[in-house]
Amino acid sequence: MHVKKNDKVIILTGKDRELTGDIIAVDREKNRVKVARRNMMVKHRKPNPITGETGARVDLENWIHASNVSLYSEIEEGDDLKRIPVRTTARWQGFGGEVFETREAAVESFGDKEVGKIKKVRYAKKTDEVFE
């Protein structure tokens, strides 16, 4: 899946289109996500006289298909910030945090030094930005 929990995303379709928020839950089996305070629904709770709970209307976030959200990047245009959705691809971080297209190139970046941790990251070509 191209998004993870706590990622900042922009919604591409539906009633909350072009609004942003953080992902609070991910369902990898059904390829769905929940975005904080977006795609809200009302759930009615029944009163329970045994436990003393009263009935209520509860606002909850509903699931959104992962294809309908995208990571976003903020770009300055003049005096204001523009939020644009970006697509990501896999890259690897080598020596000094430099980003490489292949894992082998990241290993070669260490040269004669001891090979450290090679980390797979998400990389946006459009904005040259790394999402960890």
Image (cartoon, grey):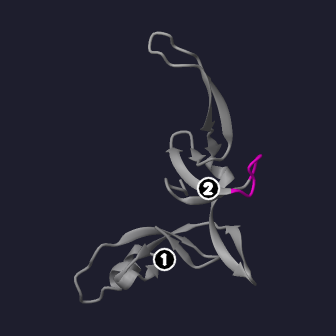
Between marks 2 and 1 in the image, the one whose residue lies nearer the viewer: 2
Q: Where is residue 82 in the image (x, y as percent from the top left)?
A: 72, 73
Image point (58%, 45%), residue name: 34
Q: Which of the 4 image quarters holds residue 58?
A: top right
> Which stretch appears magenta?
13-19
Label 2 sits on a secondary structure element that is: strand
Question: Height in image: 55 above or below 77?
Answer: above
Which residue matches tag 1?
101
Label 1 near label 2: C-beta < 8 Å? no
In the displayed structure image, the side of residue 78 where residue 127 appears, left or right: left
Residue 20 vs residue 130, the one in the foreground? 20
Label for residue 18?
Answer: none
Q: Given the current orientation, which residue lies at the most extreme bottom position?
A: 112
* Residue at screen point 47% across, 15% down: 52
Residue under label 2: 21
Instruction: Look at label 2 and name its amino acid.
Output: Gly
* Mark 2: few/some/many CA within 10 Å (<14, 14-19, 20+): some
Percent position (x, y) of residue 14? 76, 47
Q: In this view, does 114 lie to the left or right of 75?
A: left
Closest to the observer, 95 or 62: 62
Q: Position of residue 70 (x, y in %)?
A: 64, 59
Q: Does the magenta stretch include residue 91?
A: no
